[in-house]
Image (cartoon, rainbow, N blue to C red):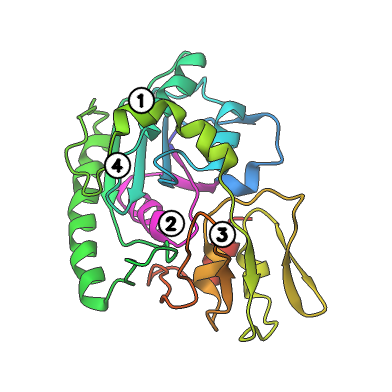
């Protein structure tokens, strides 16, 4: 019956992990989650099912949360999840377990992969250098070899996360409130004077929020943003910005950008 790996990726980190897992796991099929979001009933025929996605605000990304309740997992005998992150502690596996429990299923294994940040909002953001990416990739490849053995042999691995490098103060107290913060979470995007109207942002926008009007991108207010930052990171002119607010200073105008070296704009857009 084989393996199906459902993935979501904005910067290419999770896409790279999904592709590498496909190479390692016999008969593995990659399925982009975004391509299925308009379907109400989604059925897998695989006996092994995997989920690969990034951590957003210490949680499962919005489109993945929208997708999971629609997925029929009756055929699944083994379920695993692999998440990419900058090292942040999170509650994604806990939330995934709750969703699976309603389907009479559970996680058999889960894994964290620490990768380069694709979030250039903060003052502290530094785009990963070639040497840093190479160092990260070596660790990722070693972790993928480890995951390969576990998934192929259907081992149960539910280890406590001890590898987070970004601690969230008061996480245990704040964690129950994160879904509320996530619903309220919003940023205003815009294109500055460097914009050439190349349409790359529109192409990579996985939610369909960006529409070109008079050769300039417009972020439609009635379309939900997935906060994948693909528009921000794949703009060839670094023209896409996020507005600062009264409460939160944003540094996208000064900061560099990051996208995974093995994933281009066409790869990201191909999820649609």
Classify residue 212 as left or right of residue 83.
Answer: right
- Residue drawn at the location 66% of the way across and 41% of the way down: 37
Question: Residue beneath label 1, please?
Answer: 107
Question: Residue beneath label 3, please?
Answer: 245
Question: Residue beneath label 2, please?
Answer: 15
| CA separation in Å, label 2 and label 4 | 26 Å
| CA separation in Å, label 3 and label 4 | 22 Å
Q: Earlier in the sequence, mark 1 or mark 3?
A: 1
| CA separation in Å, label 2 and label 1 | 21 Å
Q: What range is drawn magenta here? A: 4-32
| CA separation in Å, label 2 and label 3 | 32 Å
Instruction: State which mark lies toward you, 3 or 4.
Output: 3
Q: Earlier in the sequence, mark 1 or mark 4?
A: 1
Mark 4 neighbour density, 10 Å: few (under 14) some (14–19) many (20 or more): some
Residue furthest to the right: 214
- Residue drawn at the location 60% of the way across and 63% of the way down: 269
Q: Earlier in the sequence, mark 3 or mark 4?
A: 4
Mark 3 neighbour density, 10 Å: few (under 14) some (14–19) many (20 or more): few
Q: Are marks 2 and 4 in contact (CB under 8 Å)?
A: no
What SS does tag 1 mark? loop
Q: Are marks 2 and 1 in contact (CB under 8 Å)?
A: no
Reply yes or no: does residue 112 show up in magenta.
Answer: no
Find residue 44 and report its horizontal and vertical position in percent. 55, 31
Q: Quadrant of residue 243?
A: bottom right
Instruction: State which mark lies toward you, 1 or 3.
Output: 3
What SS does tag 2 mark? helix
Classify residue 187 as left or right of residue 143.
Answer: right
> Residue 168: which numbered mark, if any?
4
């Amino acid at each position: 019956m084989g393996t199906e790996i459902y993935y979501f990726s904005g910067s290419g980190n999770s896409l790279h992990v999904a592709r590498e897992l496909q190479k390692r796991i016999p008969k593995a099929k990659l399925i982009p989650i975004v391509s299925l979001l308009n379907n109400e009933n989604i059925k897998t025929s695989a006996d092994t099912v995997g989920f690969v996605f990034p951590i957003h605000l210490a949680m499962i990304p919005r489109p993945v949360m929208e997708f999971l309740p629609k997925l029929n997992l009756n055929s699944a005998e083994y379920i695993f999840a692999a998440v990419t992150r900058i090292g942040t502690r999170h509650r994604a596996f806990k939330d995934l377990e709750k969703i699976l429990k309603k389907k009479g299923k559970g996680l058999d294994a889960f894994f964290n992969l620490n990768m380069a940040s694709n979030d250039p909002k903060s003052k502290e953001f530094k785009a990963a250098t070639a040497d840093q990416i190479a160092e990260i990739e070596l660790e990722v490849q070693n972790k993928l070899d480890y995951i390969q053995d576990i998934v192929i042999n259907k081992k149960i691995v539910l280890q406590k996360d001890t590898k987070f490098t970004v601690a969230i103060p008061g996480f245990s107290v704040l964690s129950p409130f994160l879904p509320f913060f996530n619903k309220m979470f919003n940023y205003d995007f815009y294109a500055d004077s460097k914009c050439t109207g190349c349409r790359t942002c529109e192409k990579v926008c996985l939610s369909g929020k960006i529409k070109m009007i008079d050769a300039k991108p417009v972020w439609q207010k009635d379309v939900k943003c997935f906060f994948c930052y693909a528009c921000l990171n794949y703009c060839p002119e670094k023209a896409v910005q996020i507005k600062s607010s009264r409460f939160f200073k944003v540094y996208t105008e000064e900061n560099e950008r990051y996208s995974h070296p093995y994933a281009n704009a066409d790869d990201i857009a191909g999820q649609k």
